[in-house]
Amino acid sequence: MRIDKDSTAERRHAVTHTSIVGAAINLVLSVVKIIAGVFGHSQSLVADGIHSLSDLLSDLLVLLAGRRASQGPDHDHPYGHARYEAVATLVLGLLLVAVAVGIAWNSIERLFQPVALLRPEPLTLFAALASILVKEWLYWWTLGYARRVKSDLLRANAWHHRSDAVSSVVVLIGIAGTMAGLVYLDAIAAVVVAIMIAKIGWEVGWEAINELVDTGLESARLSAVKDTIRSVGGVRDMHMLRTRRYCGQVSADVHVLVDPLVSVSEGHMISLLVEHRLKCEIDEITDVTVHIDPEDDDRFPPPVGLPLRAEASARLSSLWSAIPEARSRERMVFHYLRGKIDIEVHFPLAVCQRGGAHVADLQARLAAAIREEPVFRDVRIFFG
């Protein structure tokens, strides 16, 4: 797998920068909201402060996982460490769900104990409003980096910030309603916050699971990939196209059908062009493996039982031992097609000096001799 060093460095910087800034802001916000919630008598604001504290933990998780994921391939990880980012995203999703369950449990208990319900002070309104503004800015700022470096981990962390901003909106409404006389509203707001947090946790966790189980591109993007492959000169058809996602990128492998008689170097050139065009025209694709097929494997199963060059040449030498001209052959080309071997035999020009009738006769004798071996189908001769 080829790794772009510049993009890897940019990804590492984005993860580090957003994590450190986010952690610092979340630490301040969590302390402010918890203190304001305790002294201002708002259960939902305390819950929101705990949510911000979970954001702090997620920023640290993102920082550690992002650095690990940015490392290149090594002996134990030949495809790199990108999956660490997906694992961290899954853990982040589970963390969000766990926080949501804890908040909801505590709030529901208070709803059934009216004496335990709190009466918020005006201080809590200002704390909630400040949290909304700061966390909304942090969401857009982190999301910008996520889009730039195509990181699902940063995108998940950005939504973690957004969940805090939205939960603060609910907290603000709950506090204002409770202060207006609706005594249950603050606790209800805390439950709503918990449900929102759990939903976001489920979504980011599910995306990580899809990545870890090698989910491929959606049908619309697959159609674009197929069109790109078919646009390459020399490509007759394609099959066995597979894609898989990892950390905002996509790996693809495909079997490409070419003319069965092209040279190895021409087939290799076609595969290189397929790889280059996919990487240039399909933004997500960063790694491509192209398998060149001389015929459709679905129609004609690969001839894996046929003899390779050394054994096939030995059999032909035995079959043609009674044909003197055969000993003058310079080289042979084998074509493994439709379950048998077609042979091209190249002779020096001097062998055909006796005229066209001799050429036709020589090909007929060579073809007649190989009928004894079922692995061979046809023979063609060339001179010069």
Image (cartoon, rainbow, N blue to C red):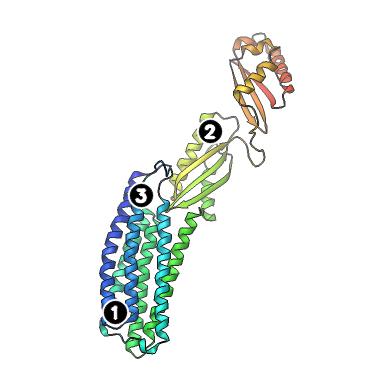
* Residue 166, x across and y down, in percent: 37, 73
Question: In the image, what residue type sits under mark 1?
Answer: Gly
In the image, residue 315 above or below residue 176: above
Question: In the image, what residue type sits under mark 2?
Answer: Gly
Give me the C-alpha separation between circle 1 and circle 2.
69 Å
* Residue 248, x across and y down, in percent: 42, 54
In the image, residue 29 above or below residue 344: below
* Residue 303, x across and y down, in percent: 65, 33
Give me the C-alpha separation between circle 3 and circle 2.
34 Å
Quadrant for residue 5, please give it. top left
Mark closer to the chain start, 3 or 1: 1
Q: Which quarter of the rendering shows the C terminus?
A: top right
Mark closer to the chain start, 1 or 2: 1
Q: Which quarter of the rendering shows the N terminus?
A: top left
- Mark 1 — residue? 37
3 vs 2, front mark: 3
Label 3 close to label 2 by CB (< 8 Å): no
